Amino acid sequence: MSENKVKKQNQNFGVLWQRYGTIGIFLLLLVVLTIAKPSSVFNSSSIPQILKQSSVNILLALGEFFAILIAGIDLSVGAVAGLVGIFSAQMMVAGIPVPVAVVAGVLFGTIAGFINGMLVNKTDLHPFIITLGTQSIYQGLMLVISKSQNIYGFPTSFTATMSASVGFIPVTVIIALIVAVILWFFTTKCKAGRNIYALGGNKDAAWYSGVNVKLHTLVVFMISGTCSGIAGIVLLGRVGAAAPTAGTGYETYAIAASIIGGTSFMGGKGKIPGVVVGGLIIGLINYGMTALTIPSSYQKIVMGALIIISVAIDHLVATKK
Amino acid sequence: MEALVRMENVTKEFPGVKALDNISFDIMPGEVHILLGENGAGKSTLMKILSGVYQPTSGKIYLKGKEYDRLTPKDSYDNGISIIYQELSVINELSILENLFVGKLPSKKVMGMSLVDYKYMNDKAKEVLEKVGIKRSPNTMVEDISISEKQQCEIAKALVSNADVIIMDEPTTSLTTSETEHLFSIIRQLKKEGKGIVYISHKMDEIKQIGDRVTVLKDGTYVGTRNVEDVSVDDMIKMMVGREIKGTYHNTESDDLSKEPVIFEVKNISRKDRKVNNVSFAVHKGEILGFAGLVGSGRSELMNAIFGAEPKSSGEVYIYGKKAEIKSPYDAIKNGLAMVTENRRETGFLDNFSIKQNISIVPFLKTSGAKGLTGLVDNKAENEYAAKEKADMNIKCRDVEQNITELSGGNQQKVILGKWMAAESKVVIFDEPTKGIDIGSKSEIYVLMRKLASEGKGVVMVSSELPELLSVCDRICVFRDGEIRMTYDISEATEEKIVKTSTGE
């Protein structure tokens, strides 16, 4: 026992940061908010509020996580979420049953991810370029399909379900957590998940070890697209309308959540629980700034600073080794 | 006449290895001095000491008569020593002109400001480019010129810096015959101007053509210096070969391996890029088949094509007599074919994985479905693989959960061997398996290779170290220009014969 203690004390900052950095940031922010405005934390609606604000971020970040894990990126997650929202909204308004519209919407997201993956594989370009392009294409499609109009008037069965809670936990959060648990299982227990880590660590060594690089890259973008699709449905339910510009800029939050959650930009390193906490941090920042009545424009500044700081610390830790 | 460079009794020790032992070497003005020796003989180390990259452990260096204990890269440059590496160092994204002056742009004062002196640059460039025979505009981008022109560009760069001594490391490896001729005429011109040239090469005919004196190194020791016209090619080969072999690992179980059943057979393998042309070979039970040849002769390209890591245009692979359709390393694993690659860091291990995960990846893929997508991670099996291979391969580590980058090169290599053993591979291709690893681990790997062969597994070994091939293999195929030129049984194989076949003498 005492030996363990000594060992723990000897752990350098690098190990501590990698292990507890994400949760540390979360607690630090919570403490700051508690000191600044105790009433915003100690009330019955604070936790559901923070969770609600986090669900879309967590879902998008879960998909983004895989793209970053293979040393790539997916800039189209926000656009895919928005496009899926428009698509499902159109179907619901046209009278197609809610479950069908929801499933079709999520599948639509999967297809959008499949297109990203195919383009990356066929062109051999960096995903940054491909998804920068498809981001613009998907956003353009949103405007075309919606004719630049808000779409609303869905069956109440849909909006009511999406804004309901089980106990004090909102349904949207439960959806995000179910997705997280499935992906956590995938990354830790499935061979395909292990292969994706290998691919992210060293593409060539993974190939020589038998990993089919293109196939797994395609799977990564399909997962990202599917998560974005689910996020699009959740966003639609929470807002109650599909805006032609919904989801714009959300990729920044998704990237921030993954990175603050401990995913290495160099690829091959990161864990699902970290990403979930990363998504919660984004939600907490949004909630806290609203509670402190700080204008939303400042939220972007804080988010940007947080991305740079967490990557910089990560980089310092990595190079010190 | 005073020597441009004189190195006396230079010794260089790396931890655990004496790379150079008491070497003397000099360069006179107006001569081409050949530096000859096998891989690992110490040629590069000696030249790195001369260019200031390494510091000698002991010995003296005289540059134009001035004594130095050690050189810095600046000492070397200031004294007119210029080195042209085999992998050229010109920058593709710059023009020829910019490459010539990179890092040393001339300046002139205009109204108190220091500006780049383009006039001087253009005049000087014109002069040196004419000398080396580049007929292009100095503003041509280097990415648009041929390899041989890039090399001329490197020589021009040396001339710009007023080099007196130009070291060329295997300059003709990627040149055609006429390009080589052109290079030689440039070298002759440089000789006339009193420059000293150090020429590192394995190609005997070239040495005879261009060399004045030849110094031979072997295992980091000095063998001798001769006038090229006084020695025959056979003499030179005799001087460079014959290294000490500690122990042999040959087959002792079968009297005639050629009567044993064929375990692994390759028929008519060719590649689209023509680096491999119509190659066939067979490995018998209990046999280790070696592949000798110069670096770049196409041996690794052949193995990559067989393993499915790079595409082949035609050819068939048979394992235990059964045809194996191999289009990717995944297919190879499924068919029981393994490959230990030449570059551990680039294509061998996964640096974000633990020892355990590096071992389990291959057996996991072998038992997966849908090209690796289906199947669950079996933690119990994974621990068993790791424990077994740690013991079998004698991997020295604290814990199999350790990251693989914490291990020494030899132990990393054992982990890589372990991953293929855990997948119960039937045939293993070893591409330079002992490159950059310590002597102790080397012999452990030889023992393992022999053990695999006697267990009835197919073993193929590619190596550029002839003593290693001769002490391990039972038959040796000699590769040159993408084809097997000769296959020697170990009873008739000698270093001389192999060197002759691989250089085309």
Image (cartoon, helix red, strand yellow):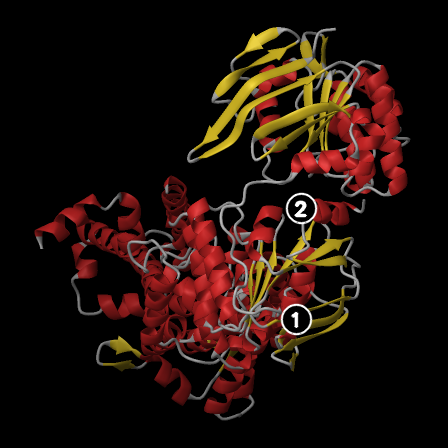
Q: Chain of mark 1?
A: B
| Three-letter amino acid code at the position of disc 1 | Ser
Q: Residue beneath label 2, please?
A: B495
Q: Categorize mark 1 by other alpha carbons within 10 Å: few (<14), some (14-19), many (20+).
A: some
Q: From this view, report whether residue B100 is shown above or below residue A25.
A: above
Residue B498 bears which disc, if any? none
Give the Cα separation between the discs numbered 1 and 2.
22 Å
Is B173 situated left or right of B286 in this image? right
Label 2 element class: helix
Between B8 and B101, the residue placed more toward the observer is B8
On the rendered image, what quadrant is the N terminus of chain A found in?
A: bottom left
Q: Earlier in the sequence, mark 1 or mark 2?
A: 1
Residue at 51% across, 76% down: B372
Q: Categorize mark 2 by other alpha carbons within 10 Å: few (<14), some (14-19), many (20+).
A: some
Q: Residue beneath label 1, please?
A: B258
Residue A200 placement (x, y as % from top left) = 49, 60
Residue A41 placement (x, y as % from top left) = 19, 60
Residue at 83% across, 28% down: B210
| Three-letter amino acid code at the position of disc 2 | Glu
Q: From this view, report whether residue B92 is shown above or below residue B69.
A: below
Label 1 element class: helix
Specify the quadrant of the image occupied by residue B143. top right
Q: Chain of mark 2?
A: B
Q: From this view, report whether residue A261 is shown above or below residue B15.
A: below
Question: Is there a contact, CB below 8 Å, between mark 1 and mark 2?
Answer: no
